Image (tube, helix red, strand yellow):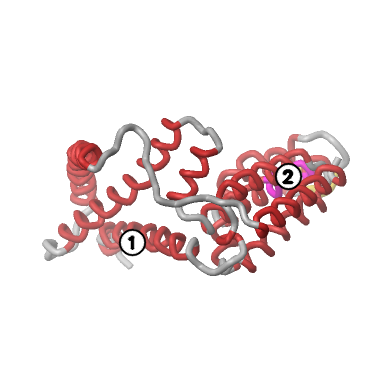
Amino acid sequence: MSRVKRRSGFIERTLININGTLEHSLFAEKLAHQDGLLQKLDPRLKWISLLLLLVSVSLSRQLWVIAGLYCFALLLAAVSAVPLAFFIKRVWVYIPFFTGFVAVPAMFMTPGATLATLPLGLVITRPGMMTALFLILRVGTSVSFAVLLILTTSWNSVLKALGILHVPDVVVLILGMTYRYIHLLLHAADDMFMSRKSRILRRQTASEDRRLLAAMSGALLGKSLQTSTDVYLAMQSRGFRGYPRTMDRFQMQWFDWTAASVVLVLSGCAFWLGR
């Protein structure tokens, strides 16, 4: 494949990435309305349970306890109509890129007994390997529980539960506006790239791709500023006075209290066994 041909795929790749992001978001909204275990629970309970499980994962000093909590997250995903392949990929695809920057150096820099010797004189120590495993497994388990909350709860319910739990209103408002505005900008960017693609009759060079990207970035910035004003005026005309209101009503049922008891027992056992 020639260099010109590789460069010409810039617009196509951008369109594919934008559409993929939108599809993942729509799929997550559909999962939140499935007939699963976590979808039936009160969002306030799910937030409190998430905090308890995150504390248990963070304080545990036993790998098998953290691994057990991760298996519990997989079990919750399975009984909540969340595809396991999608769930595992969503969690573990990005963890190595971010956690690896800290975990990999720890394998070589932590002093202790030698576990393995690599070329170029690199030595992996046993404490370093344990440190890396603890870090990666803790991050993976914590992210898994957080992803479960987002996938099995509609975004409006997540925000309302935060407000009921006395999270500052400005934080809830910023989260809600950011989530919606990202979707709006993605749709605007998708329309711009599609419009540009329909007017291109030949393959673009690298310099033309750079000029196109700069022009579209400037246009998108100007459009976002104008859209923010229009959105705020539309919110004001619909009764917005500083805090979003929803029609959802939260009420704890016997099923929620049973789930709360299970989470309390599990968190307590994990904390005790992982000391």
Label 1 vs label 2, nearer the camera? 2
Question: Disc 1 marks which amino acid?
Answer: Asn
Q: Is residue 143 visible?
A: no
Q: CA distance from mark 1 to mark 2?
A: 35 Å
Prevailing secondary structure class for the magenta stretch in the rendered image: helix
Identify residue for label 1.
19
Asked if residue 132 is among those painted magenta in the image, a careful observer would answer yes
- Mark toward the start of the polypeptide (1 vs 2): 1
Give residue 106's quadrant in the image: top right
Reply above or below: 109 against 72.
Answer: above
Identify residue for label 2.
57
Task: Give the x, y percent position of residue 175.
Answer: 42, 40
Q: Is residue 21 visible?
A: yes
Residue sitting at 31 percent across and 33 percent down? 241
Nearest to the observer: residue 207 or residue 59: 59
* Span of residues in magenta: 129-138
Q: Is residue 209 left or right of residue 74?
A: left
